[in-house]
Amino acid sequence: MGIYAELVGNVLSSPTMKQVTTPNGAKRIVELRIMSASYRRLEDGSLEQKDERTFPVDVTIWNERHTERVMQHIRTGASVVVKGDLYVNPWITRENEAQAGVHIDAESIALNLVRIDQVIFHARLRRSGDSGDNGGLDPLPDDSVVPTEFDCSEDEPGPQSTSSS
């Protein structure tokens, strides 16, 4: 188990879906790389990036419900918030030099609103007792709450939105 961390950064490479074999059988995962972002506020109110605290992080999403949404909504350049177990992954190069990279096994990933131009929410549909013109599906009341992160429980549908990043 790694250190639980929350990281804000920009997606460096669009997500790729892979199929891996686990002791429990085949599983789809999504991998992507983000550049962490650390800023400080200057006296004039503007933000300055702290270069010494900016580094690439490899992210793996193991939850198959999340993988579909990530593939649908996350693209290169998007600002995201990732939460999960963080650890250092050491390796030896072909030149026999020790290297290390930072990795997060993501529990959740969400779009950061800093680069979002538009979000459109669609009403969730629920089954009704009689099948009318809408095939037995009725929209939920307008006051229903739709989760905003991709970390929904298995029995709760996630957000249905389109976004520009």
Image (tube, rainbow, N blue to C red):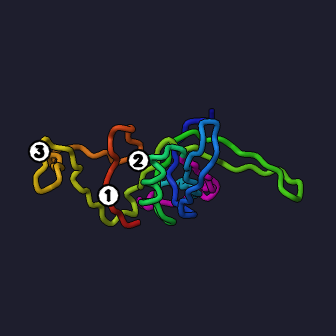
Which of pointers 1 and 2 lies earlier in the amino acid sequence? 2
Residue at which label 1 appears: 161
Expressed as whole percent of the image width and height from the top left, the position of residue 96 reads 89, 54
Q: Is residue 126 above or below residue 12?
A: above
Boundaries of the magenta span: 43-61
Determine the residue positioned at 37% across, 57% down: 113
Residue at which label 2 appears: 150
Left or right of residue 146, residue 111 in this image: right
Determine the residue positioned at 34% across, 37% down: 155
Real-space Cα distance between discs 2 and 3? 32 Å
Residue at which label 3 appears: 130
Q: Amino acid at mark 1?
A: Ser
Q: Nearer the viewer, mark 3 or mark 1?
A: 3
The mark tally for this picture is 3
Q: Amino acid at mark 2?
A: Phe
Q: Amino acid at mark 3?
A: Asp
